[in-house]
Amino acid sequence: MKRKADLPEKLCPACQRPFSWRRKWADCWDDVRYCSQRCRRQRPSQGESPS
């Protein structure tokens, strides 16, 4: 068994917090970008320009 400290991490672009690999993401870890559904909903839309 791996320790949590040994698992890969990514940085969430919405909240800028690191998040660790989860077993449910084993098949799609390369595609995971956000740490949660909440962050995915809050992502900036592509068409808007920042003010």
Image (tube, helix red, strand yellow):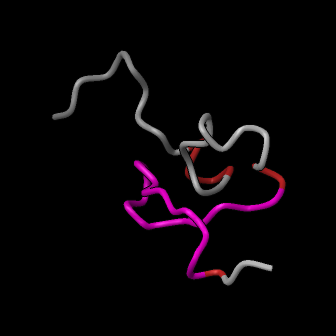
> Whole-percent x and y of residue 39?
55, 51
> Whole-percent x and y of residue 1?
81, 79
Quarter of the image with the C terminus in it: top left
| For residue 9, side relative to residue 36 (left or right) | left
- Please say if 24 is above or below 20: above
> Whole-percent x and y of residue 42?
51, 45
Residue sitting at 36 percent across and 15 percent down? 47
Given the current orientation, which residue lies at the most extreme left position?
Answer: 51
| For residue 50, side relative to residue 12 (left or right) | left
| Corner quadrant of residue 7 | bottom right
Q: Is residue 25 magenta?
A: no
> Whole-percent x and y of residue 19?
55, 65
Given the current orientation, which residue lies at the most extreme front position?
Answer: 1
Residue sitting at 63 percent across and 53 percent down? 38
Pick the residue in front: 3 or 35: 3
| For residue 4, side relative to residue 25 (left or right) | left
- Please say if 47 is above or below 23: above
- Please say if 28 is above or below 49: below
| For residue 33, side relative to residue 3 (left or right) | left
Residue sitting at 66 percent across and 44 percent down? 29
| Corner quadrant of residue 8 | bottom right
Residue sitting at 74 percent across and 62 percent down? 22
Q: How many marks?
A: 0
Pick the residue in front: 16 or 4: 4
Pick the residue in front: 45 or 32: 32
- Please say if 28 is above or below 25: above
- Tell me where the magenta segment starts and ends, as one range: 5-23
